Amino acid sequence: MYIPPKFLEEDRATLYKIIDQYGFGLLVAETDDGPMATHLPFQLDGDVLVSHMARANAHWEYFVSGKEVLAIFQGPHCYVSPRWYESTPGVPTWNYIAVHVYGIPEIIGDVAAIKDGQASLVDRLEQGKWRLEDQPDSYVTDMARNIVGLRIPIDRILGKFKLSQNKTIEDRRRVILELEQSDDPLARDVAALMLKRES
């Protein structure tokens, strides 16, 4: 990923927070037919990405090769109009957050481990309102047999926070004000991240 120095984010805790908040990522791996991508839910277990996919998805079969894969996480993003700038000339742009994670995947085939991973994901997302453990064990076991668990120890992580850092303080302030008034919740999230960096 191309990252100008002004947009580089290296703080791992900050990058992990984006993964936690925007954990539906894109897993990309090289296959015999070229790059293949699968959209997956991820969660962090220390410095390891954990996910799963359908056993019927042939993508996972390429992971046994021991080759590096790329998981892409898209944080909040929005259009930025040059009308908002005090300085001129200007052009339209897009502010966004992106996190790229590289590692060599490990396959989890054990049904009990897959069930534990699913329970952990459900508990995080449901926050106690619905529990996998309350479902019939035979049903959950059948479901677990039809998926493959993945663990990806993080070898490298890159963060790009393109939040108008290349603009003047006044231009950034005006962008924040415009985004705060947007009907788009992602635009408001970008404004909040920009404001946090200004303080």
Image: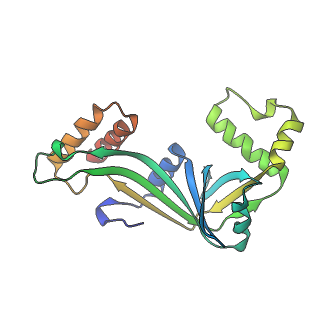
Q: Position of residue 171 (x, y in %)?
A: 17, 47
Q: Outermost residue, front direction? A: 33
At x 29% / y 42%, what residue is drawn?
195
Image quarter of the N terminus: bottom left
Q: Outermost residue, top direction? A: 129
Q: Is residue 179 above or below residue 101?
A: above
At x 74% / y 61%, what residue is drawn?
107
Q: What is the count of numbered marks?
A: 0
Question: Closer to the camera, 30 or 190?
Answer: 30
Q: Is residue 131 left or right of residue 9?
A: right
Q: Position of residue 169 (x, y in %)?
A: 17, 49
Q: Is residue 78 left or right of residue 65?
A: left
The image quadrant of residue 66 is bottom right
Q: Position of residue 68 (x, y in %)?
A: 61, 70
Image quarter of the C terminus: top left
The image quadrant of residue 123 is top right
At x 43% / y 59%, what residue is drawn?
159
Q: Outermost residue, right direction? A: 138
The image quadrant of residue 10 is bottom left
Q: Is residue 79 left or right of residue 105?
A: left
